[in-house]
Image (cartoon, rainbow, N blue to C red):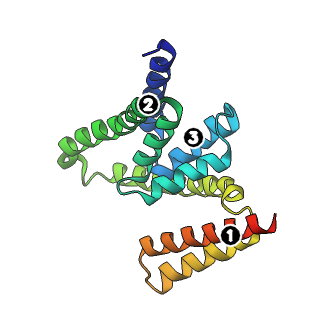
Amino acid sequence: MKKTKLKKIWEMFIYFFRISWFTFGGGWSIVAQMQKDFVDGKHELTAEELLDIVSVGRSLPGTMIGNVAYLFGHRQAGVLGGIAATVGMVTPPMLILSVLTYCYTMFKDNMWIAKMLQGVRAAVVPIILVAALKLRAGAFPTKICYVIAIAACVLNAFLNVNCVLVILLAVVTGLIMGKWKEAEA
């Protein structure tokens, strides 16, 4: 294996290991950090490519951010890059949860811990909102995409249509739109 590929694999592990320690709010806050680092900063991805990775990651079984880490790592450094990114992503929360679980009985009723967690929750919502707004341009390149998004929300939230079926319907609609656009060109 080439030294440069090993270096890239190591970089995937270190990057996700580092942001996983300090990024609160779950997968979307990590996606926001990836947007800042790889789309806006290093320009290694476009917003549309990151959105594609996130869309596929959300569609697969398992945690969204674990899937995103794997897909991104794989894109950057192959299978071992994907594995390194995933291991880097899950190691800090696993360590933190192990310690918290061990110490849970000592602080479960502590008022200061409860207030701290309320503050963290309040900060997470705007972080997720900013990430969603930044990815909006890539997700909605045409006006029909807004219609698809609204229809998907209505189907899932109000008509209780299964998420998998909603995604499959969106895939079919996207394929039809692509064929229609090809026919126009």
Residue 163: percent from left, percent from top = 44, 72
SS state under label 2: helix
- The type of residue carrying mark 2 is Gly
* Mark closest to the chain's N terminus, 2 or 3: 3
| In the depicted structure, whether residue 173 falls above or below residue 84 | below
144 lies left or right of 185: left
The residue depicted at 35 percent of the width and 34 percent of the height is 87
Nearer to us: label 2 or label 3: 2
For label 2, the residue is 81
Crowding near pointer 3: few (<14 within 10 Å), some, many (20+)?
Answer: many
The reply to whether residue 51 is in sight is yes
Which residue position holds label 3? 34
* Residue at 62% from the left image edge and 43% from the top image edge: 35
| Image quarter of residue 152 | bottom right
From the viewer's perspective, is the residue at label 1 or at label 3 nearer? 1
For the point 50% across and 69% down, which residue is it? Answer: 167
Say if 33 sits above or below 54 in the image: above
1 or 3: tag closer to the N-terminus: 3
Could you tell me which secondary element the residue under label 3 belongs to?
Answer: helix
Instruction: Give residue 177's mark.
Output: 1
Q: Nearer the viewer, residue 165 or 98?
A: 165
